[in-house]
Image: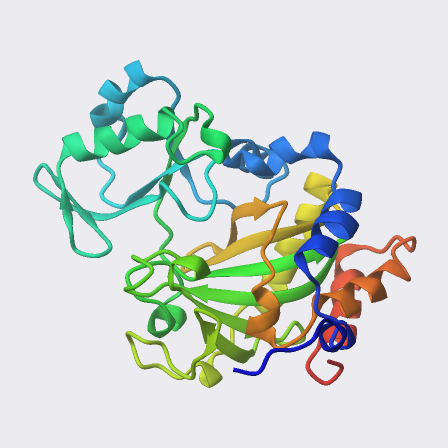
Amino acid sequence: MKWATPSQLRRQGILGMNSRNIDYIGRGNDRRLYPLVDNKLKTKKAAIQLGMSVPKLIGVVEIQHEVQLLEELLHGSKKFVIKPAQGSGGKGILVIIDRQGDNFIKTTGATLSFQDVRRHTSNILSGLYSLGGRPDVAMIEDMIDFDPILSNYSYEGVPDIRVIIYHGYPVMAMMRCSTHASDGKANLHQGAVGVGIDIANGHSLYAVQNDIKVETHPDTGCHFHELKLPRWNEVLQLASACYEMTKLGYFGADIVLDKKNGPVILELNARPGLTIQIANQAGLQKRLKQIDRMKTIKQPINDRIRLAQQLFGTQQT
């Protein structure tokens, strides 16, 4: 393996963890704004208030006593997701794709009893999956019925699109595709595939799994070079509009393409990871500095998107 030197990485515009934390997250994100994105329930309520698309909320379980009410809450729901409001890294997310009698079917085909679902919900409330182990609440959402055009690029789960937003400009994007190894979750650290996406047109650029280049999905065998995301400008508009909602300078917006509703906000992240640079084979720092040079110019969303597409499309990187 050939290692790059720090000076080589700087020349390529690679953003390191220290610079990300100090120069962009630390300086760009006021700490008083963090609860809005660290708590998925607060994010969802803020988005709904502004008329932005999010998955339908079936219910919320806030205290242990309410776990006994799950059966009533889930009555008539065959497909749903239970997640911790303050979770991270995909931990604690339970996706149910069907019910057979008293049993619940996971994306892997594994079967859970109602007691298993109650126990999982109780664990969420106790803070088993939340940031810092704090007591949490469990959100129950409708399962995303993702656009069938993406079905060959994800396995046992829903693919999502991460867009890095800096002062309201979309600067880099990737699609995260679940695999059998990632247990149907779109988390790169658990074995999902990251596909770099051209900001200009939504076309795939490069794909990695566990930081190693791949050409095809490991489970479906589908070639990533054929991937072009539909409704790409709508994805960028929704992700960029989260800047007005959160006032955060630097964050990641996770968007899902629903078959019926189009792009919807899955969640926001005030400390997005850096693997997106590997998936794009491009550094973030050069792009962020370009935005820094003009961030005092206030522009409407569509103008910001148009400018980002001109600056960061593949012809320019």
Q: Quadrant of residue 223?
A: bottom left
Residue 197 in view (yes/no):
no
Residue at the image point whose x is 46% and y is 84% from the top? 226
| Side of 52 where 20 appears, left or right | right
Residue 70 in the image: state x and y as whole percent. 25, 26
Most foreground residue, 238 or 126: 126
Q: Quadrant of residue 123?
A: top left
Residue 302 in the image: state x and y as whole percent. 75, 61
| Side of 210 where 121 appears, left or right | left
Residue at the image point whose x is 76% and y is 56% from the top? 301
Q: Quadrant of the C terminus?
A: bottom right
Q: Identify the coloring.
A: rainbow
Q: How many marks?
A: 0
Residue at the image point whose x is 75% and y is 36% from the top? 30
Q: Is residue 35 above or below residue 194?
A: above
Most foreground residue, 316 or 263: 316
Q: Is residue 71 above or below residue 251?
A: above
Residue 97 in the image: state x and y as whole percent. 24, 50
| Side of 84 where 242 appears, left or right | right
Q: Quadrant of residue 146?
A: bottom left
Kindly give the residue lying farthest to the top in the view shown: 65
Residue 307 in view (yes/no):
yes
